[in-house]
């Protein structure tokens, strides 16, 4: 079916973080969910449960999530897995915490590439581990991996886990096969397990995304792969993701940690997850194309009308990583306040993403074009007034 992503949906009456945190006169283009309606098969699946009117314990042993994951991975990635290799967890953030506890010891180090999605750092610290931060280098407007620094950190005997964000949030990088092969080789040399968070892989616009376990036998031997329908199909509130490993030992450790945490399943989450990954390929294609057009539009808008803010077309994700350093604010707080109070637009502040985030803001383009345009025009007016002072 044909979906209308231009339709503006009033979310103010729902208990949604995106539209509830900031005042009503602020346009929220921050947290990474979209303002697009979820696919009809997902809505119908959830409604069938809701209409019964009894919300008892779901059947955790029916295999509905596992079967959908097997189907999706085979059709979209050529990644062949069996149901017993699929572990349910409520979200990829939950999965990060599971990996941190399963593959590191208290006080150990967790390797990650910064700037990075804030829970990578937050969950590492909250679980009593230390963040080992491999800074991505900006080279000719593109973020590149500092492999020398990466190997030095992987070789640290206190480091036993690498949290890979692929595609990368917030920079939008799609790592090439050659880059991933090099990362895998380094991790193999130093006995470092990889948790590959690939939740943004539905939005790839340049290059080719490689599902890490399909890269090589070496990659399969050290990787726990994780993903969810949450970004592509706008289902983060349903709370369902999966962790998969072809290595039986790694898989057993993930399963044991999950069982110790007892992440009960949600009756709506199970059916919504299954519908998204088995019935909604048409939606995935359409939302991908709409977001790509939104990003191209936004990049051109910044280049032509707000050149003081440096923007580029991300290789993946619906997120823009904006360099606002030319605006001249001395602190991140001043920059954040400028967007909130002067532009009346809520974005994610760069320093939350760790080293490399200073002077940056993250903008979410997964919204109807009219909303995006309104936000960009607000930013344009605010920047013009600021630069005229």
Image: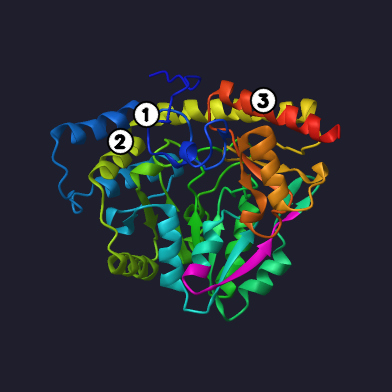
Q: In this view, does 233 lie above or below 294?
A: below
Q: Which of marks 2 and 1 is nearer the N terminus?
A: 1
**Distance between mark 2 and mark 1 Cα atoms:** 9 Å
Tags 1 and 3 touching, CB below 8 Å: no
Q: Which of marks 1 and 3 is nearer the N terminus?
A: 1
Residue drawn at 45 percent across, 28 percent down: 36
Q: Position of residue 57 (x, y in %)?
A: 16, 50
The magenta segment is: 125-137
Q: Position of residue 9 (x, y in %)?
A: 44, 24
Q: What element carries label 2?
A: helix
In the image, which is nearer the foreground, mark 2 or mark 1?
Answer: 1
Q: Where is residue 373 in the image (x, y as percent from the top left)?
A: 63, 23
Q: What element carries label 1?
A: loop
Residue at numbered disc 1? 39
Residue at numbered disc 3? 297
The part of the image, by quadrant, that contains residue 133 is bottom right
Question: Taking 60 as reference, is 104 left or right?
Answer: right
**Distance between mark 1 and mark 3 Cα atoms:** 24 Å
Tags 2 and 1 touching, CB below 8 Å: yes
In the image, which is nearer the foreground, mark 2 or mark 3?
Answer: 3
């Amino acid at each position: 079916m044909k979906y209308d992503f231009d339709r503006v949906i009033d979310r103010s009456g729902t208990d949604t973080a995106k539209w509830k945190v900031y005042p009503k006169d602020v346009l929220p283009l921050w947290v990474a969910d979209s303002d697009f309606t979820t696919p009809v098969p997902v809505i119908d699946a959830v409604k069938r449960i809701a209409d019964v009117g009894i919300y008892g314990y779901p059947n955790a042993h029916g295999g509905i999530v596992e079967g959908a994951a097997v189907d999706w991975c085979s059709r979209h990635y050529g990644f062949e897995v069996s149901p017993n290799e699929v572990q349910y967890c409520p979200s990829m953030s939950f999965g990060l915490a599971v990996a941190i506890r399963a593959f590191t010891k208290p006080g150990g180090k967790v390797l990650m590439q910064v700037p990075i999605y804030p829970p990578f750092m937050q969950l590492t610290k909250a679980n009593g581990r230390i963040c080992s931060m491999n800074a991505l280098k900006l080279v000719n407007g593109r973020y590149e991996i500092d492999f020398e620094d990466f190997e030095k950190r992987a070789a640290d005997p206190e480091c036993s886990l690498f949290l890979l964000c692929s595609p990368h949030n917030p920079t939008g990088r799609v790592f090439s096969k050659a880059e991933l092969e090099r990362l895998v080789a380094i991790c193999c040399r130093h006995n470092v397990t990889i948790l590959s968070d690939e939740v943004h892989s539905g939005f790839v616009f340049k290059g080719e995304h490689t599902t890490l376990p399909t890269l090589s036998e070496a990659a399969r031997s050290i990787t726990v792969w994780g993903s969810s329908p949450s970004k592509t199909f706008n289902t983060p509130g349903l709370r369902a993701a999966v962790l998969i490993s072809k290595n039986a030992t790694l898989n057993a450790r993930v399963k044991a940690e999950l069982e110790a945490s007892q992440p009960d399943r949600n009756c709506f989450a199970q059916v919504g997850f299954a519908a998204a990954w088995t019935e909604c390929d048409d939606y995935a294609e359409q939302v991908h194309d709409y977001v790509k057009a939104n990003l191209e539009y936004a990049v051109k808008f910044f280049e032509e009308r707000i050149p003081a803010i440096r923007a580029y077309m991300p290789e993946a994700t619906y997120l823009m990583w904006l360099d606002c350093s030319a605006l001249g604010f001395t602190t991140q707080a001043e920059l954040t306040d400028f967007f909130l109070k002067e532009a009346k637009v809520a974005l994610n502040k760069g320093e939350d993403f760790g080293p490399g985030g200073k002077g940056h803001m993250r903008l979410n383009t997964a919204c109807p074009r009219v909303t995006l345009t309104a936000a960009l025009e607000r930013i344009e007016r605010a920047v013009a007034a600021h630069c005229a002072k």
